[in-house]
Image (cartoon, helix red, strand yellow):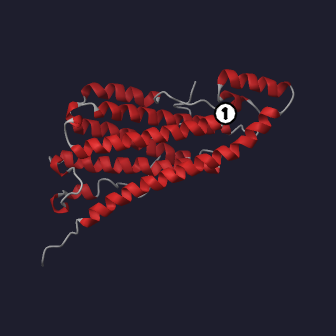
Amino acid sequence: MPPEHIDTRLLVELTEQSQDLNSDASRITRSALADFGQAVEPVRRRWWERGGALAAAVGTVALLGGHRAFADSPSPSGSMADDIMALQTAASIENLAVSVYRTAAGLPFIKDGNKTVAAFIAKTTQQHEAHAQAFNAAATQAGGRAQNGPDPKYKAVVDQALPSIKGPADVVKLAITLEDVAAQTYTKNVTQVSNADLRKLFASVAPVEAQHRATLLAVQALLAGNAADLVTIPVDPSKLPAAAGSVGFPDAFYHTDNASPISEGAVK
């Protein structure tokens, strides 16, 4: 039987499709954010314009406590308090990811190492920055405060891991953890937020994080197989280990067992 011919152009097409996925997700994210802003403004305006001592008291709480105003008021926006916390927690995860990728980019074995890995980190950092901005924009549109700090739970994980990082494999392992918790959290958030536009927002970002994780899992398999020279685009598929073709997609449906609770990274 003659050897199977593998068209390497397919890998180029898959790379282009990956870029298209992020472009499509960004478009959906922008659309969802704009629609959410238009939908929430009338609700906020009606709430703030209500007369009486109750409205005045709630307004005072809002000035002092940000999202707590929604949680403590009997307004129709009661569920919005949870939405705001979910958005703030998402922003905190993105902030931490940006910090980790920026730190990784400055490490000698990344900066002066594999160019594909360095390019991936640079592009992924930009995407996480955009995601954080989108989540914070939605949080402030809903009457909450922007979250500019990192997720406290996973910051502790990062702080513990950073001193032990010795090479690219350690960076990839840590990044996989962050991308996975982001994808799981946003996937679960789709079922937790009360607004259709917010569901669209989370649903547009979750697959991008899952895509990051899939890429990192493939890179991890190559590094573990002493095939760092194959971490490149384009690549000769005939040289790839079998695991590189399947390890990036271990689940038919994305799990949410490790999703962060909506209050984890909320502004206190």
The reply, left or right, for residue 134 in relation to residue 45 is: left
**Is the residue 180 above or below the residue 66 in the image?**
below
Q: Is residue 259 visible?
A: no
The reply, left or right, for residue 24 in relation to residue 226 is: right
**Is the residue 53 above or below the residue 244 in the image?**
above
Q: Which residue is mark 1?
A: 143
Q: How many marks?
A: 1
Task: Name the kind of residue labelled 1 in the image.
Answer: Gly
| Residue at image location 37% in from the left, 60% down from the top | 17
Neighbour tally class for label 1: few under 14, some 14-19, many 20 plus, Cα within 10 Å: some
The reply, left or right, for residue 187 in relation to residue 211 is: right
Residue 239 location (% of width, % of height)? 15, 59
Which quadrant of the figure contains the N terminus? bottom left
| Residue at image location 20% in from the left, 61% down from the top | 237
Residue 3 location (% of width, % of height)? 13, 73
Residue 134 location (% of width, % of height)? 53, 41
